[in-house]
Image (spheres, helix red, strand yellow):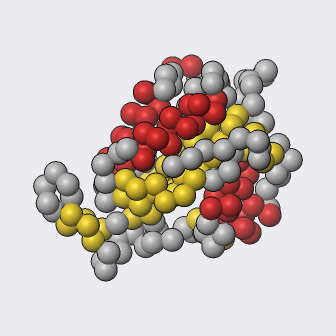
């Protein structure tokens, strides 16, 4: 994974011409309401069309049981995107929220309530942050098989800063509610 920031890799900001480092970010996508696969594909397409974001890889699709969700919540479809970006971390987070909003995400429904789209910013290079708006790496990613399993598929050498190798973290969590759906796929 590219370090953040990597002083040897730079790209010009398309708006200002300012040189910014390219960072690799991991985005976790999930949907358990509506046309789940179409929503995930729409999110992939939206990120691919975002200036200063390049989708590097999209994982296989997994069907997963909801975690800490209200009773009778439908199952999720989940995937992971690897992107390279020159966007600032805060701008990338704003973009993640805007993509959720574009696909009808309702934030007032309660913690872990069913949703049309959930986009989590999991890691941005080796960046560590802990403030009111953003915690990096994502504070529960290292415990979630629905994040770790698809991430490992697209980046076998991945690690969570401060937590360790994704392969080791995945081996330590319950994977029973996570099933790969080879009959479903997402395209860049």
Q: Residue at x 61, y 66 (%)?
A: 155
**Residue 172's quadrant in the figure?**
bottom right
Decide: is 40 above or below 146. above
Q: Residue at x 13, y 55 (%)?
A: 16
Q: Residue furthest bottom?
A: 8
Viewer-nearest residue: 164 or 179: 179
Residue 140 in view in this figure: no
Viewer-nearest residue: 16 or 114: 16
Residue 42 drawn at (x, y percent): 50, 35
- On screen, residue 106 versus residue 111, left or right, reads left
Q: Residue at x 66, y 44 (%)?
A: 185
- On screen, residue 62 versus residue 133, left or right, reads right
Residue 104 drawn at (x, y percent): 49, 22
Residue 74 drawn at (x, y percent): 74, 25
- On screen, residue 30 versus residue 126, left or right, reads right
Residue 17 in view in this figure: yes
Q: How many marks?
A: 0
Q: Residue furthest right?
A: 176
Viewer-nearest residue: 53 or 161: 53
- On screen, residue 120 versus residue 182, left or right, reads left
Q: Residue at x 31, y 54 (%)?
A: 52
Decide: is 76 above or below 124. above
């Amino acid at each position: 994974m590219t370090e953040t920031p990597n002083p040897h890799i730079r790209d010009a900001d398309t708006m200002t011409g300012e040189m910014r480092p390219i960072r690799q970010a991991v985005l976790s996508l999930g949907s358990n309401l509506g046309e789940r696969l179409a929503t995930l594909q729409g999110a992939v397409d939206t990120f691919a069309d975002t200036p200063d974001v390049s989708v590097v890889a999209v994982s296989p699709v997994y069907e997963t049981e909801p975690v800490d969700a209200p009773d009778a919540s439908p199952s999720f479809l989940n995937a992971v995107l690897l992107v390279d970006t020159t966007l600032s971390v805060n701008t990338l987070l704003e973009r993640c929220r805007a993509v959720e909003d574009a696909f009808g995400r309702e934030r007032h429904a309660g913690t872990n309530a069913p949703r049309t789209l959930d986009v989590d910013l999991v890691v941005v290079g080796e960046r560590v942050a802990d403030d009111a708006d953003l915690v990096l790496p994502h504070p529960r990613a290292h415990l979630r098989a629905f994040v770790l399993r698809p991430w490992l598929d697209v980046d076998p050498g991945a690690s969570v800063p401060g937590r360790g190798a994704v392969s080791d973290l995945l081996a330590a969590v319950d994977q029973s509610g996570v099933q790969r759906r080879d009959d479903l796929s997402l395209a860049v």
